[in-house]
Amino acid sequence: MNVLLPEGWKSPIGYSNGIEVDGGKMVFVAGQVGWNADQVFESEGLVPQFDQALDNVLTVLAEAGGKPTDICRMTVYCINKPAYLAVRRDLGKIWKERMGSHFPAMSMIFVSDLLDHPGMVELEATAVISES
């Protein structure tokens, strides 16, 4: 996996502009919300829901034999921009605990609502698991 940073571009913070991948098994993880394995939300807070949603993404990826650093693209959907901005540092700590310093190509999209109530955040991911 190779991080793409065009010459003269400032390095982004918390994501990569692009990722180049050669070969491997592709895994597409559907949007995961902050509920547990029984599809129950244990919290209505953004931080615990993000933590659980990221855990869910990594659990699905592990089922395919993948690890966090295999993720090459992630999209985050959130229903509350001010709430997100208020807890960015807390989300960054969770990211560092689970993902280390791996930052895939990412999009952050604010939406009016999610299907699963009281979901505040949803994460979907694409990974490429090396064949070696």
Image (cartoon, rainbow, N blue to C red):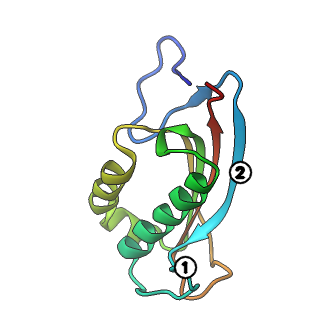
| Image quarter of residue 111 | bottom right
Task: State if disc 1 and disc 2 touch (CB < 8 Å).
Answer: no
Q: Is residue 67 toward the left or the right of residue 90 in the image?
A: right
Where residue 19 sits in the image (x, y, percent)?
A: 59, 28
Q: Compared to 2, does 83 lie above or below?
A: below
Q: Which mark is residue 102?
A: none
Give the alpha-carbon distance from disc 2 to disc 1, as whole Å.
19 Å
Q: Amino acid at mark 1?
A: Ala
Q: Regarding mark 1 in the picture, which secondary structure is present there?
A: loop
For the point 61% across and 56% down, which residue is it? 63
Where residue 14 sits in the image (x, y, percent)?
A: 40, 42
Q: Is residue 39 toward the left or the right of residue 43 in the image?
A: right
For the point 68% across and 81% down, which residue is it? 115
Count neighbours of disc 2 (C-alpha within 10 A) and say few if under 14, some if 14 to 19, many if 20 or more: some
Q: Looking at this rendering, what residue extends furthest in the top direction?
A: 7
Where residue 51 sits in the image (x, y, percent)?
A: 40, 67
Residue located beneath label 1 in the image = 37
For the point 50% across and 44% down, which residue is it? 67
> Closer to the camera, 131 or 18?
131
For the point 55% across and 38% down, which residue is it? 70
Q: Regarding mark 2 in the picture, which secondary structure is present there?
A: strand
Where residue 39 sits in the image (x, y, percent)?
A: 58, 84
Residue located beneath label 2 in the image = 28
Q: Amino acid at mark 2?
A: Phe
| On-image quarter of the N terminus | top right
Q: Compared to 117, does 92 lie above or below?
A: above
